[in-house]
Amino acid sequence: MNVIRRLMGSVFLCMALIAAAAPMDAEAGAIPEMLRRKPDTQKKTPSRTVVAEVNGRKITLAMVADQMGALPPEVGVTALEDGKRFLERFVQTELLFQEALRRKLDFSTRVQAKIRLARRQILIRVLIENILKGIKPAREEEVREYFRANRKRFRRKAFVRLSHLVVRSEAEAIKALREIRGGASFGEVARRRSIFESSRKRGGALGIVRRGEFDRNLEKAAFALPVGEVSGPIKTPVGWQIVRVTERREDADAVFDDVKEEVKEMIFETRRRHAYESLLRKLRREGKTVLYPGRLR
């Protein structure tokens, strides 16, 4: 059973690397050179160099390059470090593909439905990508104007960075508090006593918490507590807690330079959404659509 699991894991890894990941050299230096060419040159003179043969079917450098072109760039950079392994995985998936064809799995009604669905999804995605390609990023003056008009939206909310420990009863919380005030490390006591699994291993480190994000009793105590101080026992829905504030930030107006990239991305996303919605309105206006919702029952 373990052998089968390992084999299946290897197969899925291969498929993932070929279909959605890992481009690598087919031969040392060959693929990187292919990828360095300009796109238009690559289209005009695809390489017919055979890099593998699988049951008589020739695998060319152009086929491998096409596969690479469909993969995420960040994955390709890593994958190019081991061309031989990539080619071996390519061959494995080719063997599996040929076997699927030999068994005539492509004639299955279920498989045909999946192929039609995949084709539909791919075409829709490519259409949207083509429509959105023409969207230009916001200019500096546009970004500044948007920031000025929406300054309150980027106002920095007050937060505290907390460490906490959670126990089941007030008596247990008092014991833990005595240990900490007696000189024991807050983190050590939290690791030993806290029942809150997600933070216990980190010595009770909970992270940044903003107003309105957690229990009112805890919030009131945390925002009133000086940095470095430890609270008394606090009753909350998950148990009795003791908290320590390690950092505090008060409400403050945003500084343009701090949020410039965020503003730029917001403008770009707004334009993308408008372009997409505009396309849908155009298609609805020019097309003919009739709905029969009652037939879904």
Image (cartoon, rainbow, N blue to C red):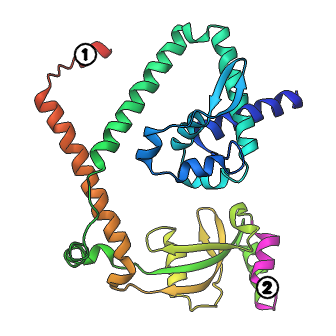
Label 1: how many Cα within 10 Å (few below 14, some 14–19, many 20+): few
Q: Residue at x 27, y 50 (%)?
A: 273
Q: Is residue 278 above or below residue 115?
A: below
Q: In x, y percent, where is residue 109?
A: 51, 8
Q: Is residue 112 above or below residue 217?
A: above
Q: Of all residues shown, which one is farthest toward the left?
A: 285
Q: Amino acid at mark 2?
A: Ser
Q: In x, y percent, where is residue 262?
A: 37, 70
Horizontally, residue 165 falls left or right of residue 131, namely right
Q: Which residues are magenta?
A: 181-194
69 or 35: nearer the eye? 35
Q: Identify the residue position indicated by label 2 in the image.
A: 185
> Disc 1 vs disc 2: Cβ atoms closer than 8 Å?
no
Q: In x, y percent, where is residue 235?
A: 61, 71
Horizontally, residue 294 falls left or right of residue 80, namely left
**Most frequent secondary structure within the magenta stretch:** helix
Q: Residue at x 79, y 85 (%)?
A: 185
- Is residue 254 in view? no
Sequence order check, earlier mark of 1 and 2: 2
Q: Amino acid at mark 1?
A: Gly
